[in-house]
Image (spheres, grey):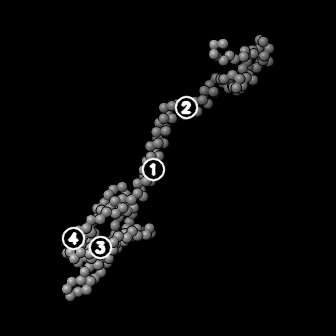
Amino acid sequence: MSGRETLPPRSTALDGGSSPGESPSAGLGAAEYPGASNNTGAGPGEGLAKAGRRSWWRRPELRRRLALLVLVVGVAAVLAYWSRGRPVDVEVIYDFGRHAPRVVRVELSYDRQGKGAQPVELDFPSAKGAPKRWRHTLSLAPGEYTVRARVHLRGVVDQQAEVRRYSRRLTVRSGEEQRIVLRLAR
């Protein structure tokens, strides 16, 4: 043999394999002969119409375009979800103004609505107190915050030490670094 598979001969009406009025391919299953159909009532265009309704998925260029569209939409959805709650670096500049030499300690609380607080404490134990401006970087999730501060001031010659309280609103936007100036001890 030449390596090709040979099929058994078909029976025709002449050699007695089919009864009169029966199609020569009737009774032949698709398993016996590829391409054979048991559908005897189909007209010449009906098989093509059924194939045309299903053929869009079999076209490689349409499958590639659909796969690319699904990939792009999926990546966009993941990026939107990921960037929405990702912490943002916020540079906070504490401006102590003219009372900077008297500042001994600062207690800060970044309260996010319904999410708890992130405390920050700054100590300035030297006799010089705090610098006029102090830079500090935090990572905060996007949202609305209330910043509460307690600034402990060193007493002057005839006064006692005092504590001043401040409260400020802060909005952290997603996807970008921010710089905020908080004026305390003014």
In what element is the residue under mark 2?
helix
Q: Percent position (x, y) of residue 173?
A: 36, 60
Mark 3 or mark 1: which comes first in sequence?
A: 1
Q: Locate residue 139: give its quadrant.
A: bottom left
Mark 2 or mark 4: which comes first in sequence?
A: 2
Numbered label attached to residue 78: 1
Residue at coordinates 72% horizontally, 25% vertically from top-left?
29
Q: Percent position (x, y) of residue 89?
A: 34, 59
In what element is the residue under mark 3?
strand
Around disc 2, counting alpha carbons within 10 Å, would you say few (fewer than 14), some (14 to 19), or many (20 or more)? few
Numbered label attached to residue 58: 2
- Nearer the camera: disc 2 or disc 1: 1
Around disc 3, counting alpha carbons within 10 Å, would you say few (fewer than 14), some (14 to 19), or many (20 or more)? few
Q: Are marks 2 and 1 in contact (CB under 8 Å)?
A: no
State whether residue 87 is above or below residue 78: below
In what element is the residue under mark 4?
loop
Residue corresponding to mark 4: 132
Residue at coordinates 24% horizontally, 83% vertically from top-left?
155
Q: Give amino acid for label 1.
A: Val
Mark 1 or mark 4: which comes first in sequence?
A: 1
In what element is the residue under mark 1?
helix
Q: Locate residue 15: give its quadrant.
A: top right
